[in-house]
Image (tube, rainbow, N blue to C red):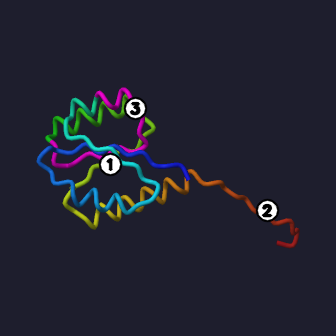
Amino acid sequence: MKTLKAYVVADSKTNMDSFKQIAGKFDGLEVQYETDVEQAINTFSLQSFDLLIIDKGLSHEDYNKLHKVADLLHPDAALVAFVMTDDEFIHYKLAGLLAKWADAHSESKTNFIDNPKL
């Protein structure tokens, strides 16, 4: 399976320990972290990501700026916002996103039934 490349932009005051611990439990997930919004924008222009995770602790201005830049530079990337202290939601959402990612990047198989009586 192809690795899901995620980029997390968090407020510098946010404790990311819990998020990092949860994300570290998932195979197939590669996460890069940033706490400086301007640096995140520069990184967007140099690298591609499959998933952008924005900390809901960021200011509305920074959140909107990141959202717009991500839409312009990586319109095919998924964008989600997390409260970085909600462990259950983080685990639930990451598990769901990885399941969709695995499904989208797995080989599909079509079975044909060749029985005219059916």
Residue under label 1, please give it: 80
Which residues, given as a range, are shown in magenta?
A: 42-58
The residue carrying pointer 3 sits among few (fewer than 14), some (14 to 19) or many (20 or more) residues within 10 Å by Cα, namely few
For the point 53% across and 56% down, which residue is it?
Answer: 102
Residue under label 2, please give it: 112
Q: In which quarter of the image is the C terminus?
A: bottom right
Query: In the rendered structure, are the residues bearing label 2 and label 1 in contact, judged by CB atoms less than 8 Å apart?
Result: no
Q: Which mark is residue 25?
A: none
Say which of marks 3 and 2 sits in front: 3
Q: Which mark is residue 47?
A: 3
Taking the image as shown, residue 28 lies to the left or right of residue 83, namely right
Looking at the image, how many numbered discs can be counted on the residues?
Answer: 3
**Residue in the foreground of this view, choosing between 91 and 26:** 26
Question: Which residue lies most toward the bottom here?
Answer: 117
For the point 15% across and 51% down, which residue is it?
Answer: 14
- Residue 8 magenta: no
**Percent position of residue 83, x then y:** 21, 55
For the point 40% across and 32% down, which residue is it?
Answer: 47
**Percent position of residue 44, x then y:** 34, 31
Q: How far apart are marks 1 and 3 (CA)?
A: 18 Å
Could you say which quadrant of the image residue 43 lies in? Answer: top left
What's the amino acid at mark 2?
Phe
